[in-house]
Image: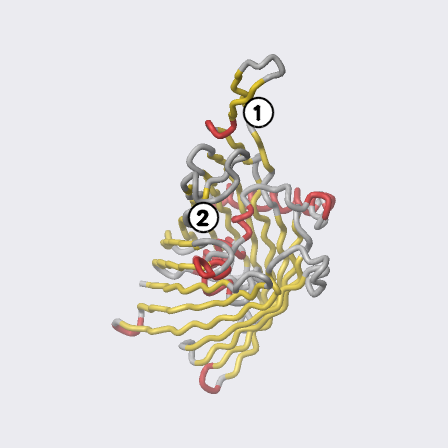
Amino acid sequence: MKRILIILTVMVLATTLSMPGAFAGNDNRRGTAGATELLINPWARSSGWGGINTSCARGIDAFFSNIAGLSFVEKTEFVYTNTILNGGRTGLVSGASINAFGLAIRLGEAGVLGAYVMAMGYGDLPVTTELSPEPGSNGTFSPTMMNLNVAFSYSFTNSIHGGANIKIITESTDNISGTGVALDAGIQYQTGENDELKFGISLKNIGPALSFGGTGMAFTTVNDAGNQMTVQLRESEMELPTCLNIGVSYDFLIEKWDQRITAAANFTSNAFLRDNFGLGFEYSLLNRFMVRAAYVYQTDLLDSDNRTTANTGIHAGASINFPFGKDNERNLSLDYSYRSAVNLKGSHSIGATFKF
């Protein structure tokens, strides 16, 4: 398994870095990718600083930022997070929410096996047609999106950690569904007297196009001769939102009260969106209380006429740890994050992490 993981991670990252044309934040391709929910961070802790912790992601939160960080799970870790997306039922998006469940178990001294499910729903949306465009007269439908992830991460040395994640993607309405599969891979490197300097690189959402089909791909019409006929549209395919993350972070350690200030920077190269640049920090006191914040920028983010995202780039969050058990070997963490948005309301995430 170790040799397979090394080969897989190196091959994927090397292939991506040798093909810079595939990642250019190309505006001509913007809006043409499918499964864009893969770009939404479902975890309360890492979303509190914009997912820029590519170099220092730890535990199940690393599923989104950099799967290599999963290797830092000490024994067993369980995480649940609920996200009210852009205001939920009180916002412009009706009932938009995300539920994420994750479990990771250490296997031996160096390996960690993990899995998580992300389920995204939009509530009940009105059905409209060409002949009946007014909402309310045709009933409702409830689109759903779900991703199942299985990953393995491995610590090659005390400084080098790598991981790979396979995800199965499903999207459906009452009459159309799509399925796909994707791969994530990542590497982290840490150095320094107390491992305070960290580097990370992760490649996400590599895989074949997401395909759609179902009875909703057919419609009934009348031809020029007045005959009624059913037309079946060709199966639709959409490429996955591939992205490459490169990050660095540094821990400023203060012995008094066991304080830590982590400064992090990250660059995200998106194949179907504009590239992102992020800066942020996390402050920890006694490893009991943590606050974090970040700003993630992309071209024209401050230009109301040309911005291409509802997010305004501001992220913030906090965590409180409650160690318990003999020698405090167990820990319960409560996490919260906020992501700002323009025109839509901000997104709130609340989660809990249980380590035992």
Disc 2 crowd, CA 10 A, few/some/many (<14, 14-19, 20+): many
In which quadrant will I find the C terminus? bottom left
Residue at (54% x, 67% y) in the render? 49
Query: At which x and y percent is residue 305?
Result: 72, 59
Query: Marks 1/2: CA distance?
Result: 37 Å
The reply to whether residue 352 is visible in this rendering is yes
Q: How many marks?
A: 2
| Residue 307 in the figure: left or right of residue 239 | right
- Residue in the foreground of this view, choosing between 331 and 329: 331
Please name the residue that numbered disc 2 is placed on. 152
Using the image as rendered, state which of residue 57 and residue 169 is in the foreground. 169
Q: Amino acid at mark 1?
A: Arg
Residue 39 placed where, x, y %?
55, 51
Q: Is residue 283 above or below residue 147?
A: below
Q: Quadrant of residue 266?
A: bottom right
Can you identify the residue that label 1 sits on? 234
Answer whether residue 118 is visible to the viewer in this image: no
